[in-house]
Image (tube, coloured by chain):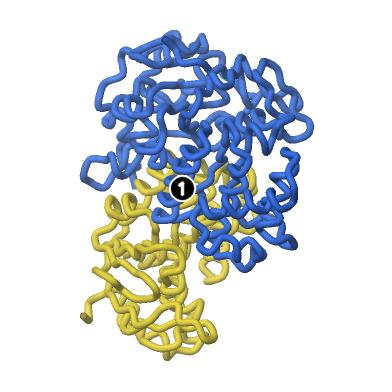
Amino acid sequence: MEPEALLSVRELRIAFDGIEAVRGLSFDIRPREVLAVVGESGAGKSLMARALLGMLPRGAATSGTISPDLSAHRGHRISLVPQDALSALSPVHRVGDQLAAAVRSVARVSRKEAKARAVAALDRVGIPDAARRARAYPHEYSGGMRQRAVIAMATVNEPGIVVADEPTTALDEEHRDQVLELLAEQREAVGAALVLVTHDMDAVGGHADRVLVMYAGRLTELGPADQVLARPRAPYTAGLLASLPRNAAPGRRLPALPGAPPAPGTPAPGCAFAPRCPLAAGPCHTAEPEPREAAGRLVACHRWEELPHPAHDLFLQEPQPA
Amino acid sequence: MSDALLDVRDLVVRYGPATAVDGVSFSLAAGETLALNGPSGCGKSSTALAVLQLRRPSAGEVHFEGRELTSLTERELRPLRPRMQPVFQDPYGSLSPRHRIRDAVAEPLKVQGRWHPADGPARVCGLLDRVGLDPAYGDRLPHELSGGQCQRAGIARALAAGPRLLVLDEPVSSLDPSVRAGVLNLLADLQDDLGLGYLFICHDRTVVRHFADRVIEMRDGRVTSG
């Protein structure tokens, strides 16, 4: 039986000036899960995340449904961990006051109680001597502490869903793992689901329950993270994974996806990935594949059954002639 | 080692009272990739800038093709600079937003007085083709290219100078993994064909392990292993 959904996205479309960047996306967010959303730049991941939060840029035309609509409860039932922790905090307010303001924006509690909750949240994310550090300004925090404070801010009101938009992109490996672990730990502590938007496939393994792979504004593959990583069924997912150095066979050349994702507004008649896909044939050039149940997950590919495993060799390209 | 392309001895870089690089030594042969790996702030990029003499080191020696660079004047360095070229992390930031790609790639030829109207444009096309960019992209501005295409243009510009050493400072860190693989393959091919030495600065261990012949680990301005 499918676990009950905390939030359901159905046929979501997001367009700017008639150009669709998200093109009919349907998926659920389950209670307490970590759902990683991966894909290359321009796949529509961040727009989808912004739509969940009701934070789409002006001029975005949307259709489809997101239910329940939590955009009026932003900061309360759904919250955001932004990419850039430095610009997410006000430089002229004390960190504790900023958290307390977040508490009082959604709960009718005394200033004292709000402050206590702010300190507790800072303590929970591992800020040493939280009561004292709550009185400091962001510039008095190190980069890592700011990142922690932003995560405390996103979890202080115990939301049902935390959306983290590329939270680790600017970080080195060591800090990336720390932030991912902290996010996972905080998600657990407040019982929230975590939507982890990232272009870093390395960040998915070990941190996500399920993974949603997006390409050109659509779902390509959605399933349990361990299964998708161990045996991708969509050629696009296989190509992304094959291109990771950690998965590469010894030797100097890495498998790579040829070409680039299509620019929005220039959809070919068939599968959007077909021009880059080593398996593309026949129907791939004429009909856009719909997500179907396959191998315990959803896969949008006409030829998923033809995908070999491992698929590395499919994406190995010959050196260019000098 | 006298036959090394690059030999760095006891390099020190200070910014005011702060010591960013604290006695780093290594050498690099032609055709070899040496990686500098370590967390943010460990001194990797300061080492790169000091090797390139873009930031003069506070102490230590940098031998490049047998010449000791730190004792040379700017004027004496000028003829050597084309032989050691940087490629930076931010592909958009390292190209002028108002110069077309072909002009950016032509610039090193013009600066060195190697530009001839008769064959210059063809050489630029050849360089773009060499890095896997359709020469038609030469007419574009950087913002009209993807990050990976821009980084390829940056590599083409570095090649235009005729280098023996590329100092690659996080050249693939801002790229999607799929695009990253293509750029790493390009760099591997160029090294095989041209025998370039690479000083490869990267914080991602999986990339380093795959790409580098040797790795130096840095922390707090010092070499911890390698």
Element at badge 1?
Answer: helix
Q: Is residue B181 above or below residue B167?
A: above
- Callout 1 environment at 10 Å: few (<14), some (14 to 19), or many (20+)? some
Q: Quadrant of the N terminus of chain A?
A: top left
Q: Nearer the viewer, residue A199 or A83?
A: A83
Is B7 left or right of A286, judged from the image as shown?
Answer: left
Q: Residue furthest right?
A: A59
Q: Which residue is mark 1?
A: A182
Q: Is residue A320 above or below residue A72?
A: below
Disc count in the image? 1
The residue shown at (33%, 31%) is A315
Where is residue B133 drawn, in percent x and y? Answer: 49, 43
Residue A303, quarter of the rendered image: top left
Give the blue chain's letter: A
Q: Is residue B210 above or below residue B78?
A: above
Which chain contains the residue that carries disc 1?
A: A
Res. B153 in view: no
Is A206 left or right of A270, judged from the image as shown?
Answer: left
The residue shown at (45%, 41%) is A184
